[in-house]
Structures are given as structure tokens and as C-alpha cells.
Amino acid sequence: MNRITETVILSVIQGLTEFLPVSSSAHLQIFKSLTRLAGCGLLLDTVLHAGTMCATLLVFRRQLYKIAVSLPQLFKNTEKKEYFQQSANKLVFFLLIATLPAAAVGITAGNFIEKNFENLYISAVGLFITSLFLLSTLFKGHGLGLSSLTYRFPLLVGLMQALAICPGISRSGATICTALLLGSERSFAGEFSFLLSLPVIAGAFLLQILKTPVTNLWVEMPFLLTAFTVSFISGWVSLSLLIPVVKKGKMHLFAFYTIPLGAALFIYLAVKGF
């Protein structure tokens, strides 16, 4: 298998599993382990995430436009209470609050995460944690819109996004399921989760690019561009498919995939260890 083919396969895996609550990081590491593919570590993974991030920008372009328009108002000398009564403005503030936990973890524990990013044992445990998140949606109602949610909502969802930095824990699964447990209506839970991914992925992409020597970037550029393009297209398809699933309340069905996958990964690692 040549390098371009490997990159395309990794990109398709990333694009399809980034938004589905099955952990893209676990799938990427499993594929790399089975094919003995070294890849280019976090740089490639970060570019793959950047491709799916742009797919999010495309799908939620109207919501993002409203957010961009409302941002300057936050810094004007207007009554803050009046500002937050507008839904777009409250959404901006919720996203800012929810971004802080993951940003703090990324800054303080970045080296530890990078060292353990390809640990399949952690991925296996993470898949079971993801399964618990998914099954939890069976036991809670929904119905609250943005106007009815308190500031506890973005804080707890943000903490779960920080937890999902660990391999095997699905970011979309952790954040959407937490939002539903807190009473959010389904459509807003999905929208908030996908929008919340943007600042974290953008920040990780920027940090990884700054850490990578320019010469290495030029050498890897053909593969990185391929990875970005393919993950963008497959990510757009995946996101378009998942949104209706979230609205119909079928998130728990993905647990019937993540539980066997986690068990199979544990068995594989046990056999491989002998």
C-alpha cells in the first residue's frame, strides 16, 4: 500500500467517524496498528480534523454568520442583560464558556496527551466510556431550547469535551449526550456540539503547525493536502447523515457498535501481548 492510498483511507475513516459518536481517534489508531502504519503522528491527525472542521463550517454557515454579526455587540457599551436576551448572543457566550475546559487541558497536558495518543489500551477503555454516554440518552427526556438553559449547561458540556481529548472517547458522543442529559432539545444539542468543536480544532491545528519545522511541512504537503480534501468531503457526508439521527433520538443505537468494538480491541491487545 503506497503512501497516498494510506492517506486517503485514513482520511475517509476520519471523515466518516469524526461526527458519528464512535471515536475517530480510536478508529484511526486501530487502522494504523493493523496496517503497521506509522503515519505522521499528531500532525496528520490534526490536518484530518481541520478537514472535518471545514465541513462543519460549510454545514453551519448560517449559524456562524449570525454569531459573527453578534460578536462586536459584546464589546459595545450596552446593557449586558439585554445583550444575552438575544439567542445568537447567548450562544456566543455559551460557546466561549464551553471552550475553556478543553483549552485548559490542551495547554497544560498537551505533552502527556501526545505521548499517549496512540495507546490502544486507552482507546479501548475510551470506547466503553463512549458507550455509557450513548446509552445514557435512553434515560432522560429533552425539550429545553437555548433560552431556557442556564450557564451550568456550557460548563458541563465543555468539561465533557475536555474529557473527550482522551483517545477512544467520542467528542460528539460525549458532548451531545451530556447536552441531552441536561435537558436540551435534540436539534440544539447537535448544533451546539458541532459548533463547539470549531475553536478547539482550530487551536490544535494552529499549535501543531507552529510546532512543526517548515521543512517537514513542505515534505509532507502533498499528503497533508490529500488528507484535508478527502476528510472534508467524507466529513460533510457524515455530518449530513448524523443530524437527522440526533433529531430522531437514536444516539443510543451507536452503543451496539462501540461496545463490541471496544471488546474486540481488548481481545486483540490480549492476544497480541502473548
Image (spheres, helix red, strand yellow):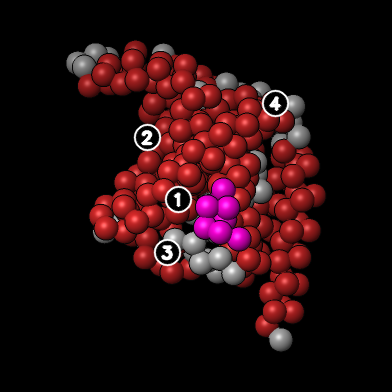
**Among the two numbered marks 2 and 4 on one chain, the one whose residue lies closer to the N terminus:** 2
Q: At which x and y percent is residue 232?
A: 52, 36
Identify the disc placed on residue 96. Answer: 2
Q: Residue furthest front?
A: 2
Q: At which x and y percent is residue 162?
A: 47, 50
- Corner quadrant of residue 144: top right
Identify the disc placed on residue 244. Answer: 4
Q: Which residue is mark 3?
A: 114
Callout 4 environment at 10 Å: few (<14), some (14 to 19), or many (20+)? Answer: some
* Residue type at numbered disc 1: Phe
Q: At which x and y percent is residue 251?
A: 72, 38
Q: Nearer the viewer, mark 2 or mark 3?
A: 3
Label 2 residue SS: helix
Label 3 residue SS: helix
Identify the disc placed on residue 264. Answer: none
Between 5 and 115, which is closer to the camera in this rendering? 5
Q: Residue furthest left?
A: 77
Q: Which residues are magenta?
A: 1-8
Label 4 residue SS: helix
Q: Which residue is mark 1?
A: 223
Q: At which x and y percent is residue 105?
A: 39, 55
**Among the two numbered marks 2 and 3 on one chain, the one whose residue lies closer to the N terminus:** 2
**Among the two numbered marks 4 and 3 on one chain, the one whose residue lies closer to the N terminus:** 3
Q: Nearer the viewer, mark 4 or mark 1?
A: 1
Between 106 and 185, which is closer to the camera in this rendering? 106
Magenta stretch: includes residue 267: no
Magenta stretch: includes residue 4: yes
**Among the two numbered marks 3 and 1 on one chain, the one whose residue lies closer to the N terminus:** 3
Q: Nearer the viewer, mark 2 or mark 1?
A: 1
Residue at 73% in and 72% down: 268
* Residue type at numbered disc 3: Glu
